[in-house]
Amino acid sequence: MMKKEYTKYFRWLPAILWMGFIFFLSHQEAGSSSQLSQGITRTLFNIINSVLPWLDLELDFFHFIVRKGAHFSAYLILGLLLAHAMKPGDRKAYYSILLLCVLYAMSDEFHQTFVAGRSGELRDVLIDSTGSLTGILLYAGASLISVKRRIQEEAKETV
């Protein structure tokens, strides 16, 4: 019994650490945040331009896509990690996970209003929420596949 309880709480650790990482990134002043995203953008931009030179990407637009993609990806991961931590069994539990992600996204954007040069944006909450929903749906799909496989394995063993 003790090991099961320990494992239950340990499942939360990745989600809590990831939330801390999101908080850390949100707490960076505008200059630091911009410098980080511009470095990543330039690297990706150069790679894409060398592989697909005909694509004719515009750097400013690509930078916007990278920044918003980072929001989406960070919250997709959060949705996956929270679903793993909560091990939802029904639709209501999945809604609870999504609500937790949306509330965290809202608090994250609110937090940014206190950071020099940063602002909170409703658009980012929507992007974060969409990422979370995608992560939760991926988890639900993987869980469904896992259950179906387990049922098929058990059916084979009984024959």
Image (cartoon, grey):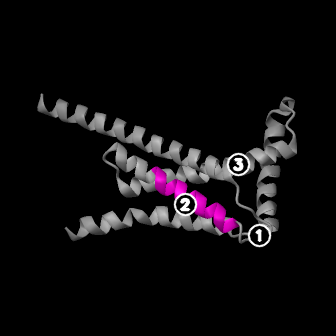
Of the numbered discs 3 and 2, the one sitting upstream in the chain is 3
Q: Is residue 127 left or right of residue 10?
A: right
Of the numbered discs 3 and 1, the one sitting upstream in the chain is 1
Q: Is residue 51 left or right of residue 121?
A: right
Q: Quadrant of residue 74?
A: bottom right
Q: Is residue 139 visible?
A: yes
Q: Mark 2 to mark 1: distance in Å?
A: 20 Å
Question: Magenta segment, which residues?
Answer: 98-112
Q: Is residue 119 magenta?
A: no
Q: Which residue is mark 2?
A: 104
Q: Position of residue 6 (x, y in %)?
A: 30, 69
Q: Which residue is mark 3?
A: 68
Viewer-side residue, 9 vs 98: 98
What label does residue 59 carry, if any? none
Q: Which residue is mark 1?
A: 29
Q: Quadrant of the N terminus?
A: bottom left
Picture mark count: 3
